[in-house]
Image: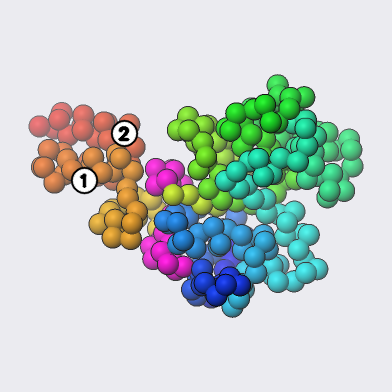
Amino acid sequence: MLSVRNVSFSYDNGSRALNDVSLDIDRGEFVCIVGHNGSGKSTLAKMFNGLLLPTEGSVTVDGMDTADDEKMLDIRRLVGIVFQNPDNQIVTTVVREDVAFGPENLGVPPDIMAVRVDEALKAVGMESYAESAPHMLSGGQKQRIAIAGMLAMEPQVLILDEATAMLDPMGRRDILNIVRELNKQKGITVVMITQYMEEAVGTDRMIVMNDGSIVMEGTPAKVFARGDELRAIGLDVPPAVELRELLKQMDVADCGDAMTLQELSASICRSLLKN
């Protein structure tokens, strides 16, 4: 679905954000891209729907080159992107109208658009707020509306560019649950950009970036097993993984590749029963 080939990118001020990056993201995959501030992950996210174009190399979406102006509308129909601050994506004073804004600009007929808006609001659990004023909603609710606006356009790919960064832990959890459900139930390809390492747990694949390059890639279990390397580039592991490492070092319990507190507690119980 998404293919990045030897992509480098420099901003107008000369700062280089990406260095010869190559990767493929399959249809229906849930990929998490992590890295510290300035690692290049958000720059890469903007490449996926042509908001930024490579200085060198190429990016294709379902075989379409983002550098081809004639394909840009088709690409943006396929790829929706949700940013960190939902206020920057809300453009009307009524929730229903805001969700309808995208499909309306794509020329979707009104009767079909109405159905899409209702389905999108239901998918994010916001159908009861259809006639509400967006500015009166909480941060998490606004982010749900931003996601609904993307869903109403029926994208095949959803990019979350640090979309949970401004939310509290409960809000982050709710948004992640919605996105996981969309991936599983609707088969939407999801690319999640984040600094929160625990958000990578449960995704299909992790990509770790540092100084504009991909430095690690694999399942969350494989990446988190390299905790020392992650710490060396200013990242960390989820709390459950850190506790798992400590228990192993103290020879208390070997909890395998447990990555959540639930998995960790189950592993500890099994270990205690064996002893």
Q: Quadrant of residue 37?
A: bottom left
First to last magenta residue range:
196-217
Dot 1: what SS? helix
Pinpoint residue 128: horizontal percent, then vertical percent.
Answer: 70, 21
**What residue sits 42% from the left and 56% below the top?**
36
Pinpoint residue 57: horizontal percent, then vertical percent.
Answer: 59, 76
**What residue sits 67% from the left and 50% below the top?**
80
Q: Are marks 2 and 1 in contact (CB under 8 Å)?
A: no
Pinpoint residue 24: horizontal percent, then vertical percent.
Answer: 54, 64
> Which image quarter is the C terminus in?
top left
Dot 2: what SS? helix
- Residue 47 lies left or right of residue 263; in this view the side is right
Q: Amino acid at mark 1?
A: Glu
- 231 or 204: nearer the viewer: 231
**What residue sits 57% from the left and 32% below the top?**
140
- Residue 145 lies left or right of residue 16; in this view the side is right
- Structural distance between the alpha carbons of marks 2 and 1: 13 Å
Residue occupying the far front of the picture: 13
Identify the disc placed on residue 195: none
What residue is disc 2 on? 261
What residue is disc 1 on? 245
Magenta region includes residue 209: yes
- Using the rendered image of the protein, determine whether residue 181 is visible from the camera's viewpoint: no
> Which image quarter is the N terminus in?
bottom right
Q: Amino acid at mark 2?
A: Leu
Magenta region includes residue 138: no
**What residue sits 21% from the left and 29% below the top?**
269
